[in-house]
Amino acid sequence: MTVATPPTRVAAAAKRPAARRPNRMRAWATRAPLLPALIFMILVTQLPFVATLVISFFDWNALYPDDRHFAGFANYSEVLSTPELRKSVGTTVLLTVTVVLVSLVLGMALALLLDRKFRGRAAVRTMLIAPFLLVPVAAALLWKHVLFNPEYGLFNGVLRWIGGDGAVQPDWISEMPLMAVEASLIWQWTPFMTLILLAGLQSRDSQLIEAARMDGANDWQMFVHITLPHMRRYIELSVLLGSIYIVQNFDAVYTITSGGLGTANLPYTIYQTFYQAHENGLASAAGVIVVIGSLILATFALRVVSSLFRAEVSR
């Protein structure tokens, strides 16, 4: 015995394909303006990375172009086992951790200061943001010549003014090279941390803060029990974004020390391997390692950003 299909169901089933087509066309119409930008991004970023990935599996010296051959993972093994390259990885980690942590602490202090109302706050904010707006090479040259120079630099000038001609006047770059690079990067990246943390401070619930004050909580108790838990995601975002950029930093190392005196990080070592040793395969393998590390950090950063957006939407 067969059961007849109701006419309404037949009509609805007949309308479904017709309804889906306009929806698909509308979706493609909204995405079409983005296609040129997507194609341009693929051509500029993804194709060079694929080429770098392919070259990283070859033993390829530019001085001997006819002697290249497939080497498998030998270049990656050499990157992780060669003392110079392994040392550059350690320098990169030390440089990144130091700059991020110090910038984070200073950024939090400045954000707490700028969160208060005082006369001239807008001007102070503008001046604090200015270092982040400088071109990285210009910032490094500023520290190298205006501040660190042992003959006419500001630091030694202040020491001479305080202690006279007999005052100790160190050669900052020669005696403390890694610290000189770190100081330049901390000065440049502290405003970045300040901006993110200040946004987090200004998103606090004012009613909760007022209730805590009425209950007798002091500034330290409010910072520990209210501000820090609220700022956790903003701190994570600052650390992750700062790490992504500082891991890839090349300008400060190249400009201030030229990679000497134990300051060569992995990006500078890649530059040396490619442009001076002409080892295309080895430099490509080191570059792929940097990209993979940056992608891992970027993945965590995107998760933190998405969690922040979800938290804002749920309010």
Image (tube, grey):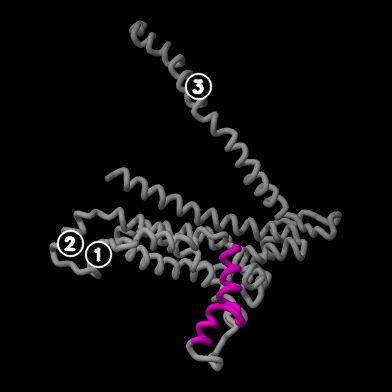
> Is residue 286 or residue 107 the one in the foreground?
107
Q: Residue 128 is drawn in which quadrant?
A: bottom left
Q: Is residue 220 above or below residue 197?
A: below
> Is residue 150 or residue 51 the one in the foreground?
150
The residue lying furthest to the left in this view is 215
Assess disc 3: are there few (<14), some (14-19) or many (≥20) residues with their C-alpha within 10 Å of its C-alpha: few
SS state under label 3? helix
Residue in the picture at 52% in, 67% down:
185
Would residue 128 appear left or right of 270 to someone viewing this image? left
Q: CA distance from mark 2 to mark 3?
A: 55 Å
Amino acid residing under circle 2: Ala
Residue 106 position in % (x across, y down): 40, 69
Q: Is residue 35 above or below residue 104?
A: above
> Dot 2 corresponds to which residue?
212
Q: Earlier in the sequence, mark 1 or mark 2?
A: 2
Q: Is residue 159 magenta?
A: yes
Q: Earlier in the sequence, mark 1 or mark 3?
A: 3
Q: Is residue 310 above or below residue 34?
A: below
Residue 171 position in % (x across, y down): 60, 83
> Dot 3 corresponds to which residue?
25
Amino acid residing under circle 3: Met
Assess disc 1: are there few (<14), some (14-19) or many (≥20) residues with their C-alpha within 10 Å of its C-alpha: few
Quadrant housing the N terminus: top left
Q: Residue 71 is drawn in which quadrant?
A: bottom right
SS state under label 1? helix
> Dot 1 corresponds to which residue?
225
Q: Is the C-beta separation of discs 1 and 2 under 8 Å?
A: yes
